[in-house]
Amino acid sequence: MSGHHDHSHGHGDHGHDLPFWRKYIFSVDHKVIGCQYTFTALLFLFFGFTLMMIMRWQLAYPGQPIPFIGKYLSDDIAADGVLVGDGYNAFGAMHGTIMVFLAIVPLGVGGFGNYILPLQIGAPDMAFPKLNMASYWVYFCGGVTMIASFFIKGGAAASGWTSYPPLSVFASSGQTMWLWGMVLLITSSLLGSVNFIVTTVQMRVKGLSFFRLPFFVWAQLVTSFLLLLAFPPLEAAGVLQLMDRLAGTSFFMPSGLVYATEPQNQLAGGGSPLLWQHLFWFLAHPEVYVLILPAMGIVSEIIATNTRKPLWGYKSLVYSAIFLGFMSFIVWAHHMFMTGMGTTLSTFFQATTMIISVPSVIILTCLILSLYGASIRFNVPMLFALAFLPMFAIGGLTGLPLGLTASDIHLHDTYYVIGHFHYVVAPGTIFAIFAGIYYWFPKVTGRKMSEFLGKLHFWPSFLFINAVFMPMFFQGMAGLLRRQYDQTEQLHGAVAHGLTKMSSYGAWLLAIAQLPFIINFFYSMFAGKKVGANPWESTTLEWAAPSPPPHGNFDKTPVVYCGPYEYSVPGKSKDYCPQHVAQEA
Amino acid sequence: MSTTVIPHDLEPHPLTGMYNGKFGIWLFLASEVMLFGALFSTYVLLRVGAPPGQWPAHGSEILNVPLATLNTAVLIGSSVTMVMSWAALKMKKLGAARVWLTVTFLCAGAFLVVKYFEYTDKFSHYQVWLNEPIKVGEHEVTTIKGHLTADCPKLEVSEKNGAYSVTEHVMITPDAEPGGHAHGEAVKIEASKVKRISNFGPRHSPYLATYFTMTGLHGLHIVGGMVVILYFILTGGSIWKRSQEKYTNRIECTGLYWHFVDLVWIFLFPVLYLL
C-alpha cells in the first residue's frame, strides 16, 4: 500500500505507541476485537444463565421467596422475594434473547471468528478493520439497550424471544427497547458478515486455495452468508412491529381484534399475525445454523489435531456445510405447523426439514469416523469436543419428531422442544465454545490453561448439563407445556414435578461447576505454563504466528504448500506437516 | 513491519475482479435486497389477503402520481450525475467530479422536498367512518374524506395507541367528487356518529401503512446517501491528495449504493402509485 492509509490514523499504526484507549478500547486490531467480543459475550452468557437459575427456582419451589438475591430484585419482578408472573415472562424472553443474540452468536462468530479466521488464512487483519470495530461497538450498544430495558417502567420485553404479535404490540415499552436493541444487533452482524466474507475470499495467502481452507473457515464463511441474507427480513419485521407499536399501523393486527375485552376498533385492521411469524422464522431458522456451524468448525479443528489424523471426508464436510446453509433458508415454517397455515405448506416444509437433516448427519458422521483408529490425546479441549458429538447428536435426532407434522401435534410447545434445542445449543455449541477457549488460549495469551482445573470443569459440567436437559424430554412427552409460571397448577405438571426439581438442581450445580473454569481462566492468564507458538503440534496457519500474535500477525507473510490436516503422513519424520512449511519432494 | 497492509485494498483480486471495498458494497447490497424483499413480500401478502375494498384499486386514488413521476425523473437524473462524477475522477478531473457530486446531492435534496409535500398533504387529509349513513348533498354516505375546517374542535389523541377520537363534533369539508363538482359545504358530525377518524397517515389503512413504511425507509436510505456524498464533497481534496485511486474507488462504491437506492424507488413507484 502506498502509505496513505495510515495517514488517517494520525501518527502511524505502531502497536506500541498507540494510547491505551486506541490499543484496547477502540482498537481496530481483529485480535483485540475478538477478545472484546469474547469477554462481553461471556458476561452475557453468565447473565442469561443467572436469569434462568432464578426461573428454575420458581419452577422447583413455586411461590417461595428466592434465596440470596430475591430481596434485591424490584417489586415489579419479585414481590417480597417471590418471582411474579410478569417477571417470569420477562426473564424467559430475555434469557432467550440474551443467550442467542448476545452470547452464543457473538462468541462463535464475533469472538472465535474474529480472532482465528484471519490467522487461519494468513491475513494481517480483517479486510475492513474500522468496520470491524464499529461492528463490536454497535453490538455493545445493542446489549446495553437490552439490559437497560430491565430498568424502565413496565420492565423488559416479556413476549418471549419470538415476540409474537398481537400480544407483543400491546406489551409495555420494554418491547420497544427490545426492537431497537435487535435493530442494533442486526446492524452489527451485517457489518461483521460483510467483513468476514470479503476477508475470506480476498485475503487468503498465496497457495491457500478454497479446498485447503481449514473447515473452521468454511463454517465461518457459510455462517456469514446466513447472517448477511437471513437477518434483514427480521430487521424488516422489526421495523414493521415498531410501526405497529409507535405509529398505530396494523401490519400484524387482524380486523375485529379484541384485547383484554376491549374491541380494537380504532385500528385499521387487515394485518396478519402470521406474517410476523414467517418473517421471524425466516431469520430464526438459519440462526440455528449460525449457532451450530461455528461450533462444528471449532470441533473439527480440535478433533483433527488431537486424533493426529486428517479429518475423514473433508470435502463431504465442506459440501454439507454449504448445502446446509442453502437448505436452512427453506425450512423456516416447520416452526409453524400448529398455526393453521395449511397442510400443503406444512407438507412442503416437512419434506425440506427431513432433507436438511441429511447434511447435519453427514457432518456428524465424518467427525465420528475421524476418531476411528486414532491414538487420541484426551486433553481438555478434546474432552469438550468429544462430548459435543453425542450431545449434538441427541439434540439433532430429537428434532426429527418435531419436524414431522403428525408427531409435532403432540410435542409442540412442550418441554420436549426446550430439551431438543437446548441439547443443540447448550451441551452442543457451548461445549464447543469451551473446547475452543481451552484450545486457542495458548495462542491468545502464550500460556496454557491448567489441565487439572479443566478436567474439574469438564466432568461435573458434562454430568449436570445432562441432569438439566434430559428430564425435559420425558416431561414434554408427558404433556408438560413450556412457558408456564407454575407447573404444579395442573395435575400432570404436579406429577412430573420431581423431574422439574432435578432440572433445577442440575442448573444450580452446573453453575458451581463453572467455578474451576473461571479460576482457571484468570489464573492461567497470568500464571499459566508458558508455551511456544505451536503447543498442540497443529498444522493450520494460526500456529505459524507467534503467541500472542503481534499487530499484523505474522513475522513474515506465510505461503501455503499443502492441505489443512496433514497429520501422520507416511514417510515423514514428524507426525504433522504445517501448511506453511514446504515439503521436501 | 509496523503498518498493517491490507491486501487487495486497492488492486482487484484475481478471483472476484474486485477490490475489497467494491466486493463489500455488493455484499451489503445483497442484504439490502433481502431487507426490501421482505417488505415487498409483506406488501404482496397483505394485499392478496385483504378483503375486497380494503385496498384502493389503484394507488393513484390516494397518491399524487404526477409528483411521483417528477421524483422518479429527479432520482434517475441523480444516478446519471453520480456516474458523471466517477467518470470525471477516472479522467483525473477532481473539480468536475465535485460539481457532479454536488448536483447529485441537490437532486437528492429535491427528491426529499417533493416527498415532504406529498407526506404533509396526506397528514392533513382526513377520513371519517360513520356508525350510520348520513346525507351529504344528494347522497347517503357511510364515510367522508376531506379536510377539517379551521373551526373544527381539536381531535383527542389516545395516549395508549395514538388513535384519534372526537370529543364533541367534527367539522369536515368533503373532497370534490371526481365528476368535477366544487368542494361541498362543510359537514358537522356529532361525536356519537363517528365510528373511527384518521388522517391519511400510516394508521389509516394497511395500504398507507405499507406506503409510509416503504417510502420512509427508502427516504432514510436517501438521507444516508446524502450524508456520504456530502462527506466526499467536503473531504474530496484531502483524500484525493493522498491517493487518487482510493478516492475514485470510494466514489464508485458510493455510486453503487446510490444506484441501488434509485432501483428501489423504480420498484416502489409502480408498486405503490400505479398498481
Image: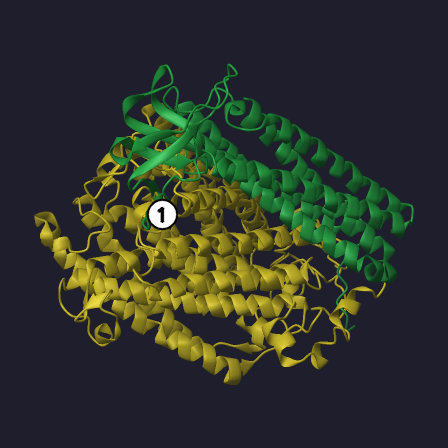
Q: Where is residue B13 shown, x and y percent of the image?
A: 77, 48
Which of the image's four quarters has the N terminus of chain A? bottom right
A582 horizontally vs A442: left or right: right
Any part of residue B131 in sight: yes
> Residue B155 occupies which quadrant of the picture?
top left
Residue depicted at x 38% and y 18%: B137
Name the residue beneath numbered marker 1: A162
Where is residue A431? Give x, y as percent: 41, 61
Q: Is residue A276 above or below residue A348?
A: below
| Pick the front one: A246 or B171 | B171
Residue A375 in view, yes or no: no
Q: Name the outermost residue toward the bottom.
A: A527
Residue at 59% from the left image edge and 46% from the top image edge:
B220
Horizontal arrangement in the rendering, residue B61 relative to residue A455 (left or right): right
Chain yellow in the figure, letter: A
Q: Which chain is green?
A: B
**Amino acid on which disc 1 is placed:** Thr
Mark 1 belongs to chain: A
Residue A112 position within the rendered picture, expressed as x and y whole percent measured from the top left: 54, 62
Q: Residue at x 57, y 28 (%)?
A: B64
Q: Quadrant of residue A466?
A: bottom left
Q: Is residue A22 left or right of residue A345?
A: right
The number of numbered badges drawn on the structure is 1
